[in-house]
Structures are given as structure tokens and as C-alpha cells.
Image (spheres, rainbow, N blue to C red):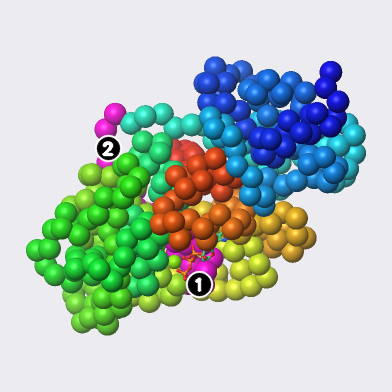
């Protein structure tokens, strides 16, 4: 039997999140086996609640550890800390372990790894929308898109913000572009193929944008059926993709209304900080108006808590209030705060390729699985 120090050292080496090898996952998919921290030393199944040797609990999302090659985050792994370590956990930790309560305080379901598709399309369009700035819309668009693409879905990302942050985040210099989503919107007869860019991620394409798009907001005002301009522009692309994700700008102006009119579902990223819920009423009202007047198919798929830090009471309280307000609309998946995300913007690629084994990449993979599970549940 290894000593506690040896166990801690072994777990330290693989990070603090629940991981197991892909091969082990494949063979154990149907039989769920809970292994103890000691058993996990065989490298096949690593415990979720690893300590850092100091006895202090380490949380899932807030650290920056890498997962080792061949491992990925597994929300299905069960907690089984050693008794000495368990004594340092919160009073309800035992219940949390037993019921596998996720960060939102609800039992965490298992989201299966999606099977391959034999045919593609028609696309489900998702608008990533919140008029509040800096809440993780662009980060979520890139990384949800990349994770869906990893699971074999054909994905188109639409940069619908004149700041072009999505394009930059995928390594495109918006200033150098001759044709952007603006041309697709405003010029009749413009083919989407001329504007589309392939990204470095297989299965994922981009409709880029730059500052030109800000003119569209004004020019569209005098157009006939101005709110459905994007919908018309995307129509010819529907059969080529499984998911189209639109990165909205931080406003509820005409561009965002266009995104909502084109979309089937809305994802609302919410930063876990005090003013998170401010303005959400206005957003849900806008969604309802678009639903009533322009797009009856539109529905709120989910609220995504971002930049969550489980170490702070503040983050936990905000998340609890968000769950209180939106209940089942809140995704079980919560995105932790990590410096890895700003780094990926500089690198110009999604976290799933930039730091494939990081906790942030794992979180967006889980989100992709949750989004797919919600789509299939309908
Ligand atoms: N989970 C996270 N942890 C830490 N930093 C993050 C996280 N998600 C996003 N960020 C960083 O926060 C900043 C804002 O994120 P992002 O650009 O995705 O927000 P946004 O809602 O698209 O902003 P805007 O409203 O300006 O378009 C970026 O610098 C990004 O790298
Ligand atoms: Mg943005």
C-alpha cells in the first residue's frame, strides 16, 4: 500500500481533475467502476478530488494543470478521497460525492461521448448572446465550436461583431480581409464560398468580420425584412454544417436581432460576478420579442456560467443565484477562470488545440457533450 505522500505525488503528476485514459474509457464505458486513489496509480483511472499534499481541497477548474497525454477530463469519475483528506472537505462533501453534485449544486448527469455522424446537416444555429461585454461570448464560440468539431460535427463560426475578436482568436487578421460577413449581408449575389475561411481545426470554418460590419447596422435599417438578412445569407450553407455558432456583439442592436432571428437556440454566457444578472431581464425580453414577432423556433438553450472560481465564496454565491433564477436552463457545465483563455487569443487557436489537455479544454468538451445531449433530448 503506497503512503499518502506517494499517492499525493502520483496525483500531483496528473493534475487534480478526474481523468482516465481513452482506452480505459472505451473498455469501461458501460461498467462504471469507482476506483480508490490508490488504485488510480495504475494510470487508468484517476481520482477527481486529488489533494495537493497540503490537505487543502483543489478545485476542478481554477487551476492551470495540464492533463497528461491520452487523458481527458471525465465528469463521470467518482470522488473517493482518502479518509484523512476527506476530513478536510466541506461538511456536505460526503453527500456531494454520493450524489455526484456538480458545481451548480445539482446532480451531475453523465453526458455520453457522441457517436460519429453518417451524414451532415441541416444545421442547428446557435447564437452566443449577451449584451454585457467581456462575459466569454467569443471564447465560448471558438471553444464550443472546436469541441463540436472534434466530435466530428461540421461547424461554421460566424463572427458577428465588428471588433472581429472571433476572427482574431482564430488567427485571422481582420484588417487584411477584403471580403467579410458584411459583404455577404449587403451584396446580393455574393456567394458564401467567397467569404468562408477554413480554420486550422478540421471540420470548422469561419465567416470572418471586421469593422466594415459596423456600417451594416446603419445600412440595414432601410432594408426590406432587415431583421432576417443574416438568416437569408446563411440559408445556402445550412446543409453543409451540423452547427452554426454566431458570436454576437455586446449590444441588443439590429445585428444581434439578426442573429436571434437566424438562430434556433441561444446560449447566454454569464460571468460569475456580482453584476452578472443585471441586464439579463432585458436580454430574455428581447429573446421573447424575437420569438413572438420574427422567429417562433427560437429558444433559450442555456445559461453558461463562465469565469467561475470555486475557491471564492463570491463566485459560488453568484452561481447559486443564477441557478435559483434560471433553474434547469443553467448548463451543468461551468467554465472555470483560467489564464489559459487569454493565452489562446494571443496564440490564435482554440484551447482544445492550444492546450488540449487543460482543464479549460476539458470543460468545453463537456459543454459540447451537454449541448449535444440537450439537442438529442428534444
Ligand atoms: N474562463 C475564462 N477564464 C479567464 N479568462 C477568460 C475566460 N473566458 C474568457 N476570458 C477572457 O476574458 C476576456 C473576455 O472574453 P471574451 O472576449 O470571450 O468575452 P466577450 O463576451 O466575447 O467580450 P465582448 O463583449 O467584448 O465581445 C478575454 O480576454 C478572454 O480571454
Ligand atoms: Mg466577443
Label 2 residue SS: loop
Is 334 left, or right, of 343 in this rendering? right
Q: Nearer the viewer, residue 203 or 178?
A: 178
Is 345 left, or right, of 312 in this rendering? left
Query: Residue most toward the left?
Result: 189
Q: Which of 42 and 257 is in front in this view?
A: 42
Determine if the magenta segment contains residue 90: no
Residue 179: x %, y % from top left: 19, 66
- Whichever of callouts 1 and 2 sits on the residue coming sooner in the sequence is 2
Q: Residue 133 carries which label?
A: 1
Residue 143: x %, y % from top left: 45, 51
Label 1 – label 2 distance at C-alpha: 34 Å
Mark 2 neighbour class, 10 Å CA radius: few under 14, some 14 to 19, many 20 or more: some
**Among the 4 quarters of the image, the one containing residue 281:** bottom right
Q: Residue 119 carries which label?
A: none
Mark 2 and mark 1 in contact (Cβ < 8 Å)?
no
Mark 1 neighbour class, 10 Å CA radius: few under 14, some 14 to 19, many 20 or more: few
143 w.r.t. 224: above or below: above
> Does the beta carbon at disc 1 come under 8 Å from ligand 1?
yes
Amino acid at each position: 500500500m503506497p503512503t499518502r505522500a506517494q499517492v499525493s505525488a502520483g496525483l500531483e503528476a496528473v493534475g487534480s481533475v478526474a481523468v482516465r485514459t481513452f482506452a480505459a474509457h472505451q473498455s469501461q464505458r458501460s461498467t462504471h467502476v469507482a476506483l480508490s486513489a490508490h488504485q488510480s496509480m495504475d494510470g487508468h483511472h484517476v481520482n477527481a478530488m486529488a489533494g495537493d499534499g497540503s490537505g487543502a481541497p483543489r478545485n476542478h477548474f481554477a487551476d492551470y494543470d495540464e492533463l497528461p497525454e491520452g487523458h481527458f477530463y471525465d465528469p463521470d469519475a467518482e470522488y473517493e478521497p482518502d479518509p484523512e483528506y476527506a476530513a478536510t472537505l466541506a461538511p456536505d462533501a460526503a453527500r456531494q460525492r454520493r450524489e455526484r453534485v456538480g458545481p451548480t449544486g445539482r446532480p451531475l448527469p453523465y453526458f455520453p461521448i457522441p457517436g460519429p455522424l453518417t451524414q451532415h446537416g441541416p444545421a442547428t444555429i446557435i447564437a452566443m448572446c449577451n449584451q454585457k461585454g467581456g462575459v466569454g461570448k467569443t471564447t465560448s464560440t471558438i471553444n464550443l465550436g472546436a469541441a463540436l468539431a472534434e466530435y466530428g460535427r461540421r461547424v461554421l463560426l460566424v463572427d458577428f461583431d465588428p471588433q472581429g475578436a472571433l476572427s482574431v482568436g482564430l488567427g485571422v487578421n481582420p484588417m487584411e480581409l477584403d471580403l467579410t460577413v458584411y459583404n455577404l449581408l449587403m451584396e446580393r449575389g455574393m456567394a458564401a464560398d467567397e467569404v468562408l475561411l477554413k480554420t486550422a481545426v478540421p471540420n470548422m470554418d469561419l465567416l470572418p468580420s471586421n469593422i466594415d460590419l459596423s456600417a451594416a447596422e446603419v445600412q440595414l435599417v432601410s432594408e426590406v425584412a432587415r431583421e432576417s438578412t443574416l438568416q437569408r445569407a446563411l440559408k445556402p450553407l445550412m446543409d453543409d454544417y451540423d452547427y452554426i455558432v454566431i458570436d454576437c456583439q455586446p449590444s441588443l442592436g439590429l445585428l444581434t436581432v439578426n442573429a436571434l432571428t437566424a438562430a434556433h437556440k441561444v446560449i447566454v454566457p454569464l460571468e460569475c460576478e456580482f453584476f452578472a444578472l443585471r441586464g439579463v431581464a432585458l436580454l430574455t425580453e428581447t429573446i421573447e420579442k424575437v420569438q413572438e414577432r420574427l422567429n417562433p423556433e427560437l429558444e433559450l438553450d442555456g445559461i453558461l456560467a463562465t469565469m467561475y472560481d470555486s475557491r471564492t465564496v463570491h463566485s459560488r454565491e453568484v452561481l447559486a443565484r443564477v441557478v435559483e433564477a434560471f433553474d434547469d436552463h443553467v448548463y451543468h457545465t461551468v467554465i472555470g477562470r483560467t489564464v489559459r483563455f487569454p493565452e489562446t487569443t494571443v496564440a490564435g487557436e482554440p484551447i482544445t488545440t492550444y492546450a488540449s489537455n487543460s482543464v479549460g479544454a476539458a470543460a468545453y468538451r463537456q459543454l459540447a457533450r451537454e449541448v449535444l445531449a440537450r439537442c438529442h433530448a428534444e
